[in-house]
Amino acid sequence: MNSLTSSSQDSYSANPYAGSSFDGNHYAQQGSAERPMTVDDVVTKTGITLAVIIVGAIVNFGIAIFVSPGLASLLTLVGALGGFVTVLVATFGKKWGSAATTLIYAVFEGLFVGGFSFMFTNVTVGGASAASLIGQAVLGTVGVFIGMLFVYKTGAVRVTPKFNKIMLGALVGVAVLALGNLLLALFTGFSPLRDGGPLAIIFSLVCIVLGALSFLTDFDQADRLIRAQAPARNAWGVALGLAVTLVWLYTEILRLLSYFQNR
């Protein structure tokens, strides 16, 4: 199960929404009969999306424990690939802002997260159990989210076009490295970016930093949509972007913690 999930996760280890361009004047000039988006819309839609992911994760984790690890492994792979395809459809198929697209992604990603988390049930770090390890990853993810929200609200780091371009370049670079590592692992069995060694630790730390910075672009995008009085349905697109970042960050933090087993 480890090779299946780690390989599938490498296929999309970056937030495709980070650094994306958005012209707020589009909505300001066109106007819309639909109610404009508010902060409450973003919070509500993001909450629903995360709830679906959590339920899906619990279901697949339960299948792995009580039914069949093999079935859970298959569902994990389906979830990873399905989530990846859904994000591509949302990005290039003009389905961004669709409730159906976001919720379908949440179902797929829930299956993936549950199976990915199950991979670490036999991992202990400093005597900590798997449940503790997963709990630490969840708390770490929430902590980074809150911390980056504070950074954004205080203006300590400003999201500018240059910032977005740098982020996009960095994320593309990480995606290329992850894809190269995936191909290397498939053909040689050697996975230097995911084997728990020094290079793997550095790579995960880089991914965590980029994941944290991706929150800034997510927050900025939501801010601009609200100021431009974009239709309320766009909150689903913001929720999708935040969910992608949260899941990526969680998996990288959990993976990093696991690297310190037996150290």
Image (cartoon, rainbow, N blue to C red):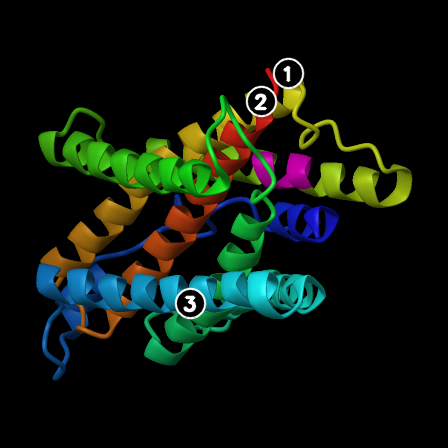
Q: How far, Cα to Cα, is label 3 from label 2?
A: 28 Å
- Residue 226, horizontal then vertical, whole percent: 13, 59
> Compared with residue 117, is residue 66 higher up or lower down, i.e. above or below?
below
In the foreground, 199 or 229: 199
* Furthest residue in direction right, as rendered: 188
The amino acid type, in three-letter code, at marker 3 is Ala
Q: Quadrant of the C terminus?
A: top right
> Compared with residue 162, is residue 90 higher up or lower down, i.e. above or below?
below
> Does the residue at mark 1 contact the one at mark 3 (Cβ under 8 Å)?
no
Q: Which residues are magenta?
A: 174-178
Element at badge 3?
helix
In the foreground, 12 or 1: 1
Q: Where is residue 80, by image quadrant?
A: bottom right
Q: Main secondary structure of the magenta part?
A: helix
Crowd band around label 2 with a 10 angstrom C-alpha radius: few (<14), some (14–19), many (20+): many
The residue indicated by pointer 1 is 198
In the foreground, 133 or 104: 133
Crowd band around label 1 with a 10 angstrom C-alpha radius: few (<14), some (14–19), many (20+): few
The residue indicated by pointer 3 is 106
| Magenta stretch: includes residue 25 | no
Q: Which mark is residue 21?
A: none
The amino acid type, in three-letter code, at marker 1 is Pro
The residue indicated by pointer 2 is 201
In the foreground, 5 or 20: 5
Q: How far, Cα to Cα, is label 1 from label 3?
A: 33 Å
Asked if residue 215 shows in the view, the reply is yes
Crowd band around label 3 with a 10 angstrom C-alpha radius: few (<14), some (14–19), many (20+): many
The amino acid type, in three-letter code, at marker 2 is Ile
Marks 1 and 3, the one that precedes in the sequence: 3
Element at badge 2?
helix
Marks 3 and 2, the one that precedes in the sequence: 3
